[in-house]
Amino acid sequence: MTAPIALGTPLRRVRSVWVHMAGLSLVFTSAGMVVCAGVDVIEGGHGAAGLILAAGVTALVGEAMRRGSRVGEELNPRAVFVAVSLSWVITAVAGALPYLFTGLLGSFEGALFESISGFTCSGSSIFSAADFADATPGLLFWRQMTQWFGGMGIIVLAVAVLPFLGVGGLELIRAEAPGPTSDRLAPRVSETAKRLWAVYVIFTIASAVALFVTGIGWFDAAGLSLALVSTGGFAPEAASIGAYDSVAVEVVLIIGMVIGGASFTLLYAALKGRPLDYLRNSEFRAYVTGLFVGIAAVTVFLTTTGSAFGESLRMAAFNVVTLGTSTGFGNATGAGSPGDFALWAPAAQVVLLLFMWVGGMTGSTSGGMKVLRAQVMAGVAWRELRRAERPRIELPVKQGREVVGDAVVGRIAGFVLLYVVIVMAATLALTLAGNDILTGFSGAVSAMGNMGPALGEAGPASSFAVYSGPERMILAALMLIGRLEVFPMVLSLVVAANWLGRRVRSR
């Protein structure tokens, strides 16, 4: 006979990194839902009960996962990759509950897409004007908050976790990133996370105050600030930034987007009294130069098609910056308005598409392949061009003044190849489903780069509701892959495939 279990004996906790990490994520997510329920009550909404119910379910599951698991003493890169990937997926599923429990969205697929788009800071939406009208203030604030949570998650992953493990190519941040150490802001990862949170909160508050001064009201100012610092792109209004039709609002957002699309280690250095570190960073110089060149080019293209210079400059500056930082705000006041870049000259759209590929800087909240990787690959192309002329010449690839090792160049080349292959495979799937090439290709590029709007039928004056449910799930998968820097999600799929293969062979 087996001995009876004594009362009060603690249950054995499972050793699982992903279960513990996902549980913690759900607990924090539930707290955000409670805050949004409070906002709903203050603003006189009717969705507080649904938000509280979603928070309760999320907290219950999260706390059970947290208490029933523990993290082992030694972590390998594979375990961390799987933990990060599954945590994001599970958190996104929980993030869909408020849309369902408040009754705004009737399908789980639609709610999950909106949640994934928020947590990955993509800004792509299926919301219609009627959905914005029916949504309670608390739910709209939750939609904004998902981006804020997602933005900080990716900063900690990029600056602290991946460089610490020495994988994914992001250790290139060591080249010129300022701070107490090259890849962290403090010797301990936990202290790095605290300092990043502090910078993130300060940036959020400053952005909210600046937006409030423009006269848009506290609710919209707070909501937009959550999307701005995370380069997310959601807005509390159906027409996005076009609803305000304000140059002052657009100027504040442009400044904020440029800061958000740059490395947060540079912002940390500036707050510590070293603002010149921005100018010393070669990636930042390339990032800002690219934005200026893009604005100038698009302004010329718009002016030559008949638009006034002032209006062309305003539209070019806002839309180049919003896509160059992967934020995805739109300043179109409606279909066919000057800000609807889906109707711009083809040359201007090509420039915007290039920015959708590249995105912002490493160590930032922005998506895309990142400026640093583009710099390195341009260096490789230049080296091979010179070698074609002089085969024996030795030309190291440099990032700023630092030489980039061949191992790192190889990882970046692998990243770029994977990135392009995944985008092209998704484009094939979307076009086979019946989309035209522009809508399919730009939608895949936008989702992979966490950009928000696309071109064609999914332009800034439209929404991703033009895609069918299965197509949106493909795009949602791209958002997750792009937001997690490709390697974590791809390696997680490899781990899952290997596990499944072992199970099949064992039978």
Image: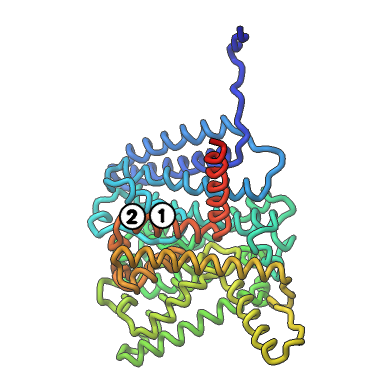
Q: Determine whether 1 is above or below 203 in the image.
A: above
The disc label shown at residue 38, or none: none
The amino acid sitting under disc 1 is Gln
Q: Is residue 84 above or below residue 12?
A: below
x, y percentage for residue 343?
30, 79
**Element carrying mark 1:** helix
Q: Quadrant of residue 334?
A: bottom left
Colour scheme used in the picture? rainbow
Instruction: Inspect the image, locate mark 2, and give the three-letter code of the amino acid beneath it.
Output: Pro
Q: Answer with mark 1 or mark 2, whichever residue precedes in sequence.
A: 1
Q: Residue furthest left?
A: 130
> Which residue is rendered at x = 31% and y = 63% of the image?
433
Observer-side mark, 1 or 2, equals 2
Label 2 SS: helix
Residue at the top extreme, as displayed: 1
Q: Residue 68 location in percent, x, y? A: 57, 30
Q: Give the residue at mark 2.
A: 470
Quadrant of the rendered image containing residue 429: bottom left
Mark 1 neighbour density, 10 Å: few (under 14) some (14–19) many (20 or more): many
Q: In the rendered structure, are the residues bearing label 1 and label 2 in contact, judged by CB atoms less than 8 Å apart?
A: no
- 364 to the left or right of 469: right
Q: Residue at x 59, y 79 (%)?
A: 286
Which residue is nearer to you in this view: 291 or 203?
291
* Residue 474 place in picture, x, y as percent: 39, 57
Q: Label 1, on which residue?
A: 144
* Residue in view at x 55 percent, y 38 percent: 19
Q: Is residue 492 left or right of residue 241?
A: right
Estimate the x, y position of residue 452 in percent, counting from the top left.
Answer: 40, 65
